[in-house]
Amino acid sequence: MVRLPVLTRHTPAGVLQLRELRRRDARAWRAVRARNAEWLSPWEATVPPGTGEEVPSYGQMVTRFRAEARAGRTMAWAMTLDGRLIGQVTVAGITLGSLRAASVGYWIDSRVAGQGLTPMAVAMASDYCFGALKLHRVEIVIRPENAASLRVVEKLGFRREGPRPAYLHIDGGWRDHEVFALNADEVPDSLVETLAARHESSGSRFPRSGDQGGIDFGS
């Protein structure tokens, strides 16, 4: 995989799009991250002390993501709303063969949180994994204290599989996580359409694919 697909969905908040994270996004990405430092830091991966590793620069991060994309192991999307960068969705650890699985991570600007954009973005990425990549399993690992992220997997119907003690180095220490997952046969239709239908029935309507476009898997 060399070039990531562009995934687009019309929402009540605006046009939500997942596209490749680019070098020229550096200024916007840094600005959003700086503005949300306090909001994001409790859930952010950190480098364990004594390893000799350093936190990569933005340019180094993009270079690594592109190398991993070429190898078919990672898809790192910028999340945009009406063309403005508001977050990121990363599908990592893509494994084919007899496993056919991947892990999804994400973050969003606090200014647009609470509008259903993160669940929709994760649904778009997951649908691509199950559809285009023919993956069998998608998982998300979450700190049990992260109530906002727990609401995301709840809305999408990910099932809880159990704890992973001291799983990732987060916010300066090895933190426990909970694993949530979906298998392809648990998603007979589409997570995007299922989520849109739920919003429609609750009176907070996302356009269905027959309305204003659905997901665009083209570049």
Image (cartoon, rainbow, N blue to C red):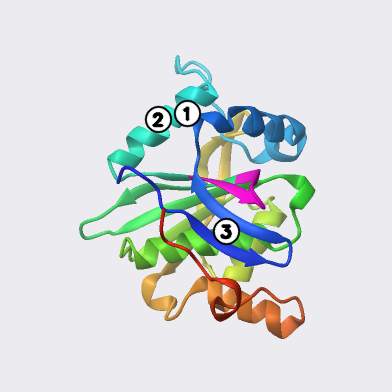
Regarding residue 143, the answer to whether it shows in the image is no
Per the rendered image, the range of residues in magenta is 77-87
| Residue on which the image places disc 2 | 64
CA gap, disc 3 and disc 2: 22 Å
Chain-order first, disc 1 or disc 3: 1
Q: Main secondary structure of the magenta part?
A: strand
Do residues under tags 3 and 2 come within 8 Å of each other at their CB atoms?
A: no
Instruction: Decide which of 85, 185 is in the foreground and name it.
Output: 85
| Element on which disc 1 rests | helix
Which disc, if any, is residue 61?
Answer: 1
Image spot of residue 194 (x, y percent) = 56, 78
Do residues under tags 1 and 2 come within 8 Å of each other at their CB atoms?
A: yes
The three-letter code of the residue at mark 1 reads Met
75 falls in the magenta region: no
The three-letter code of the residue at mark 2 reads Arg
* Residue at x-position 50% and y-position 29%: 23
